[in-house]
């Protein structure tokens, strides 16, 4: 009998510790993982040398982590042909690779290492990929202090009327605001976030409700040095040669999906009535010191200043009332059905002064 | 009766013990989680909707003070007394005096003042600011240097800032930032909490979100130039649990605001000082 009691007690202890300190029992726990990893690598080292794929250049390789200008030239000699401003517009020259990789460089008729930059690994074909190659996963993330930039470009005079078109800062070279229907422009976020000119990438599963968003539903984000070098070319750090001032090596290579993430998919940035300054709705942006974790979230209260006013419009209240009548109703004024079929958040009920409904199953 | 009981075989305690042990272990393990979620539910955060409106001239028409940074410091005005005194007693130097002290041209000072700019990054340098009668000499020199470097006068104008002397480019902004940084350190020392900041939009509105309930001081830390005056705001505000600031905003203004729309709603006026003459 005693034995059973002890067994039960031990079992209880095991359950307790498995809840309170799961890492003691998990194989992926850091200590266990490291030990196992090191043992394995020791074994494999003894058995055979790791095979290096020279066609997969990585900035994470220790030997590739010298100063960026060791290999990259700013500007590259071809900038006048491909850009309208001095830029890093090409891969590094052969010298950058040959100084360490001579054996790989002359290994065969078609050395694998050449395929990092060249379309064909042949001495007779010099054609290179577009720089940077859009098909390659990205190896760097961007660090950008939003708050500092908003401070420095701040101007105090508010817009007076819609007919006044406030001028943008000319230093930035950027695409013209095509398809923008609201004339009011501000000298702040729009310097970098102009109205989108590229078709948004569709999700793998396709657009919800087959709603293909128009170009002007979104704002664009900078994709080149155009919005940076106009001020940071020299003297204002981080300058052109200080790549690491903005480009931080990512934990692992990644391929940005480009699929827009939005709760209110039907909102149109460029609509004629949407003339408020960006920060009037994106209320948390000005306190963001980094791009990390930055979410351009917009609280419902900024929408309902116009979209849920007695005597004006009652878009939120109307949809909540419809949902009250039929639990199968989808909110589609702002949302597509992938979001609109979910239970509305409490903020929506609060702002429209309605008691929350019983949650849908 | 006694004999029967004595002869009855004793029941195994293994099953009940195991079940009790498991239940106890589960309770111990999940107790911290329950406590944590209860603590989170206990104090829902609040929102501050700040609005800053100022009036100049006769004061009958106020406008939102746009694109100015405000800071949220934990604690009441009394608790932050040392900080408030430091903010109110700091020396003033106007933007005009700063640039005049650097020997900037009157044309550059006027260009900055025209749109209330602290630095040349603030607005576009138009062709008329580089050529002709209204040209700014510093801009002309920078464009000439850029034209030599880039081989394009248009690019030189667009990238004008890269060929300007650092002090002329953003010296006033940088000096303001240095003062701000020193005061922020002091604010965090005095309040023993992280200081948050937001910038006002074109209507003079800014939001502090996810704020723990309690008493706070809202301040601009460094004086804001409004016309010929410098405004310093230090205002106390109480954040209630779950207050989403959906009613009236927390309005602060300057003493000269007589706008009838604001009159009854102003929660705090600034400490106003005239901008000192250039020494």
Image (tube, helix red, strand yellow):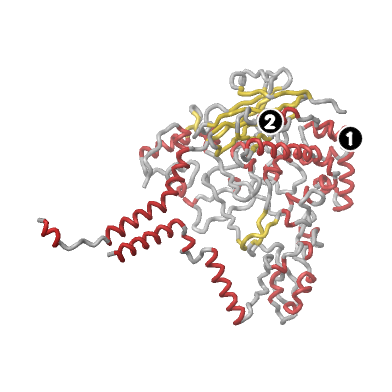
Dot 2: element: helix
**Mark 1 packing: few (<14 Cα in 10 Å), some, or many (20+)?**
some
Residue B105 is tagged as 1
Question: Quick check: A121 left or right of A12?
Answer: right
Check residue B82 in the rendering and tell me which mark sits there, or answer none: 2
Q: Are marks 1 and 2 in contact (CB under 8 Å)?
A: no
Query: Rounded to the nearest whole Å, what is the CA distance between mark 1 and mark 2?
Result: 39 Å
Which of discs 1 and 2 lies nearer the camera? The answer is 2
Identify the residue at horizontal 39%, vertical 43% (top origin).
A329
Horizontal side of B111 relative to A58 (left or right) equals: right
Disc 1 or 2, which lies upstream in sequence?
2
Name the residue at 84% across, 25% down. Answer: B277
Give x and y (percent) for residue B30: 41, 51
Residue at 76% of width from left, 74% of height from top? Answer: A100
- Does residue A84 lie above or below A348 as drawn? below
Mark 2 Cα-neighbour bin, 10 Å: few <14, some 14–19, many ≥20: few
């Amino acid at each position: 009998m005693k034995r059973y009691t002890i067994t039960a007690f031990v079992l209880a202890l095991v359950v307790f510790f498995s809840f309170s300190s799961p890492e003691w029992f998990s194989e992926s726990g850091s200590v266990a993982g490291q030990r196992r990893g090191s043992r394995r690598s020791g074994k494999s080292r003894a058995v055979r040398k790791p095979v290096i794929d020279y066609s997969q250049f990585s900035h994470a390789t220790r030997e590739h982590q010298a100063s960026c200008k060791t290999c990259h030239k700013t500007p590259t000699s071809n900038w006048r042909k491909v850009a309208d401003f001095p830029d890093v517009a090409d891969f590094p020259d052969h010298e950058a690779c040959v100084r360490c990789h001579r054996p790989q460089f002359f290994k065969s008729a078609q050395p694998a290492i050449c395929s990092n930059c060249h379309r064909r690994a042949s001495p007779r074909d010099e054609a290179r990929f577009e720089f940077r190659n859009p098909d390659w996963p990205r190896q760097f993330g961007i660090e950008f202090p939003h708050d500092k930039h908003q401070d420095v470009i701040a101007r105090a005079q508010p817009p007076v009327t819609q007919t006044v078109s406030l001028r943008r800062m000319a230093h930035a070279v950027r695409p013209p605001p095509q398809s923008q229907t609201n004339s009011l422009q501000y000298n702040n976020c729009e310097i970098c976030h102009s109205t989108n000119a590229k078709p948004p990438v569709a999700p793998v599963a396709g657009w919800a409700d087959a709603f293909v968003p128009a170009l002007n539903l979104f704002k664009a984000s900078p994709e080149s040095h155009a919005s940076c070098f106009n001020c940071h070319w020299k003297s204002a750090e981080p300058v052109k040669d200080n790549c690491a001032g903005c480009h931080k090596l990512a934990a692992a290579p990644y391929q940005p999906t480009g699929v827009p993430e939005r709760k209110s998919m039907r909102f149109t940035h460029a609509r004629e009535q949407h003339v408020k300054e960006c920060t009037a709705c994106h209320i948390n942006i000005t306190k963001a010191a980094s791009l990390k974790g930055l979410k351009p979230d917009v609280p419902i209260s900024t929408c309902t200043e116009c979209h849920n006013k007695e005597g004006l419009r009652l878009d939120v209240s109307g949809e909540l009332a419809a949902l009250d009548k039929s639990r199968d109703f989808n909110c589609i004024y702002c949302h597509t059905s992938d979001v609109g079929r979910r239970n509305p958040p409490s903020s929506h009920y609060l702002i429209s002064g309605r008691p929350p409904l019983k949650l849908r199953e | 009766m006694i004999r029967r009981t004595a002869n009855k075989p004793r029941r195994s305690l293994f099953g009940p013990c195991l079940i009790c042990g498991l239940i106890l272990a589960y309770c111990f393990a999940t107790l911290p989680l329950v406590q944590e979620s209860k603590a989170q539910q206990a104090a829902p955060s609040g929102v501050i909707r700040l609005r800053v409106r100022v009036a100049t001239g006769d004061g009958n028409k106020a406008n939102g003070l746009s694109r100015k940074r405000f800071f949220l410091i934990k604690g009441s005005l009394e608790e932050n007394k040392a900080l408030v005194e430091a903010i109110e007693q700091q020396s003033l130097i106007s933007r005009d005096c700063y640039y005049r002290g650097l020997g900037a041209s009157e044309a550059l000072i006027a260009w900055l003042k025209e749109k209330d700019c602290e630095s040349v990054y603030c607005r576009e340098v138009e062709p008329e600011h580089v050529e002709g009668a209204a040209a700014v000499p510093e801009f002309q020199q920078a464009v000439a240097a850029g034209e030599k470097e880039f081989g394009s006068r248009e690019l030189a104008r667009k990238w004008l800032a890269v060929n300007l002397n650092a002090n002329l480019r953003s010296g006033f902004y940088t000096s303001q930032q240095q003062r701000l940084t020193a005061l922020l350190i002091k604010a965090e020392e005095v309040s023993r909490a992280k200081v948050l900041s937001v910038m006002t939009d074109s209507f003079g509105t800014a939001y502090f979100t996810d704020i723990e309930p309690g008493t706070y001081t809202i301040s601009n830390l460094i004086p804001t130039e409004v016309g010929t005056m410098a405004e310093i705001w230090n205002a106390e505000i109480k954040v209630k649990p779950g207050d989403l600031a959906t009613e009236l905003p927390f309005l602060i203004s300057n003493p000269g605001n007589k706008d009838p729309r604001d009159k009854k709603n102003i929660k705090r006026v600034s400490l106003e000082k005239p901008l000192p003459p250039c020494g």
